[in-house]
Image (cartoon, rainbow, N blue to C red):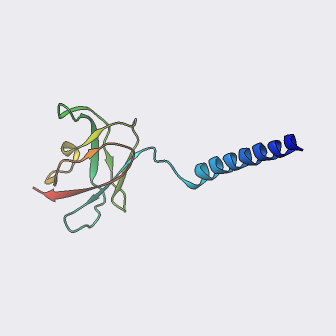
Amino acid sequence: MKAMKRFISVFAAAILCFATLAFTACGEEKATAYTVIVTDTNGTTLEGITVGICSYDEATQEKGNCLTPVATDADGKAVIEADEGTYIVNDDTLPSGYACKEKYVLKAYGEYTIVVVND
């Protein structure tokens, strides 16, 4: 009888553990890219803005290798596939007449909003 209770307890714990893992895996979508949303100073999203990112060393504040720029879609979003790391938005890829309002450092996969201004 004691062995049966122990078996049932271990079995129930295993089921609970697997259910928790399955729920976590199904319920949460893990980001695997950097999504940059470009807006103007009024918060209006901008379509067709070319956005690029470069690897970035925060200690030395030096820009490293730059990735191929991506244009924003109708929602103002540019999805950039890259290895996870620290990147900086590359002002050089923005269209003529535009600049980032500030320095934007992307430290992990996810969604970032950047504000651009007219020079």
Q: Residue at x 59, y 48 (%)?
A: 25
Residue 39 percent coordinates (x, y): 26, 61
**Residue furthest toward the right?**
1
115 or 73: nearer the viewer: 115
Q: Residue at x 39, y 38 (%)?
A: 82
Quarter holding residue 38: bottom left
Q: Residue at x 33, y 46 (%)?
A: 70
Quarter holding residue 69: top left
Residue 56 percent coordinates (x, y): 25, 35
Image height of 29 relative to 7, above or below: below
92 relative position to 37: left or right: left
**Residue furthest toward the front?**
2
Count of marks placed on residues: 0
Q: Residue at x 36, y 62 (%)?
A: 74
- Check the picture and name the quadrant holding the C terminus: bottom left
Image height of 53 relative to 96, above or below: above
**Residue furthest toward the left?**
119
